[in-house]
Image (cartoon, rainbow, N blue to C red):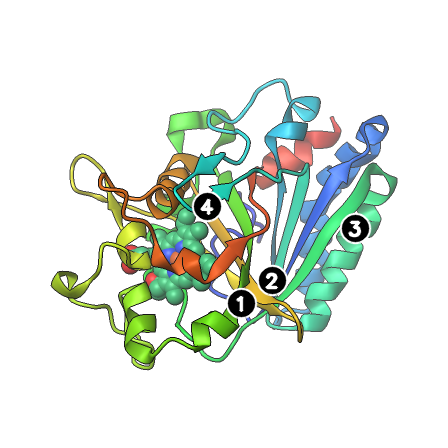
Amino acid sequence: MMTPFQSGIIAEASSDALFITLNVNRSEIDTLTSALAATPALIGELQAQFPDAELHAAVGLSSLIWDELDSARPKFLAPFPHITGKDIELVSTDVDLVLHIRSSRHDVTYQLGQVLFTALGKSVTLVDEVSCFKYLDNRDLTGFVDGTENPAGEQRKSVALVGDEDSSFKQGSYFNLMRFVHDLEKWEKEDLKTQEDVYGRTKHTNQEYPSSEKSVHAHTKRTSLKDENGESLEILRHSMPFASLTEKGLMFASYSKTPVIFNMMLESMVKGDENGNTDNLMKYTQATTGQAFFIPSNDWLQSCAN
Ligand code: HEM
């Protein structure tokens, strides 16, 4: 049965993923709306054909294209933020559309990518496609398990899905995508303790450091944020590694009911805390893209052709 939200948002971690980014040819908006309206059915057909492939997808639109399709707007839909820190400047590389496809079978992931790209036809131009894989037991290529502190069970929905606070866009989600290229040569020269301090977690046993031992520069310190009532601010991450022999990195991907939390985490990493303490992980990796999208509900997609 089709969920009201796009299934790629909530589903558990996958072993294979494909991130496709696209721009829209503005003279082909009718082709685009028909294709978007058809996507829930097209995804459903392949899910039915390959029931064991754990196939899930999410189709999203950025602030650049949204107004061409709907006169109402998700409350917080905005371009990717421009964040300048002491050593790093992050810029938006926003595009119009994203397809996030994942499954346990590379062939099925590919097939859905092909089906959706064909359906979009002349309405889009391909910007980029990045194929990702599960590395060992869900490790980033720096060798650390990624995704451990993700929300679990029903909490995934309360973290990732828009609720009554924006009722016209309920069951949607805000999606952020960043392509990070790692300097593994530099990383691998570091001893184990230095690497573990960078994350604030142990490498082999994947244990969190006691907070008294965590550096203010640790990645998990800089991204563990709380609101004014002391409640944790969370996002749902579906990041996965990509690699060729010459370029290796992480497609950072996260869903949230508001992009504000992601933006705060990124600021905390790049601008740092009140004393300017930034995230040491950023010394070993460089963001080459930064994009923000809204992933509408299946109902919204289906109503697109009207
Ligand atoms: C935690 C890797 C970028 C947000 C972690 C962990 C790893 C990791 C290994 C520890 C285990 C866990 O998942 O809980 C990376 C890498 C990145 C990256 C390799 C880029 C190259 C980001 C970005 C954000 C982010 C851009 C958000 C703006 C988080 C959050 C946690 C986390 C919220 C959980 C913190 C906690 O509660 O302990 N990341 N990450 N990460 N990361 Fe990242």
Q: Residue at x 25, y 73 (%)?
A: 207
Q: Position of residue 130 (x, y in %)?
A: 67, 60
Q: Residue at x 42, y 45 (%)?
A: 160
Q: Residue at x 55, y 67 (%)?
A: 241
- In this rendering, which labeled residue sits more in front, label 4 or label 3? 4
- In this rendering, which labeled residue sits more in front, label 1 or label 4? 4
Mark 1: amino acid: Ser
Mark 1 touches mark 3? (CB < 8 Å): no
Image quarter hosting the C terminus: top right
Q: Which residue is mark 4?
A: 88
In the picture, the disc for residue 102 is 2
Q: CA distance from mark 2 to mark 4?
A: 31 Å
Q: Residue at x 69, y 54 (%)?
A: 43
Element under disc 1: loop
Give the mark nearer the N terminus: 2 vs 4. 4
Q: Which residue is mark 3?
A: 117
Give the mark count. 4
Locate residue 296: give its quadrant: top right
Q: CA distance from mark 1 to mark 4?
A: 31 Å
Mark 4: amino acid: Ile
Element under disc 3: helix
Give the mark nearer the N terminus: 1 vs 3. 1
User: Relative to 23, is 297 on the left or the right?
Assistant: left
Mark 1 touches mark 2? (CB < 8 Å): yes
Q: CA distance from mark 1 to mark 3?
A: 21 Å
Q: Is residue 72 above or below residue 253?
A: above
Give the mark nearer the N terminus: 4 vs 3. 4
Comparing 264 with 31, the one in front is 264
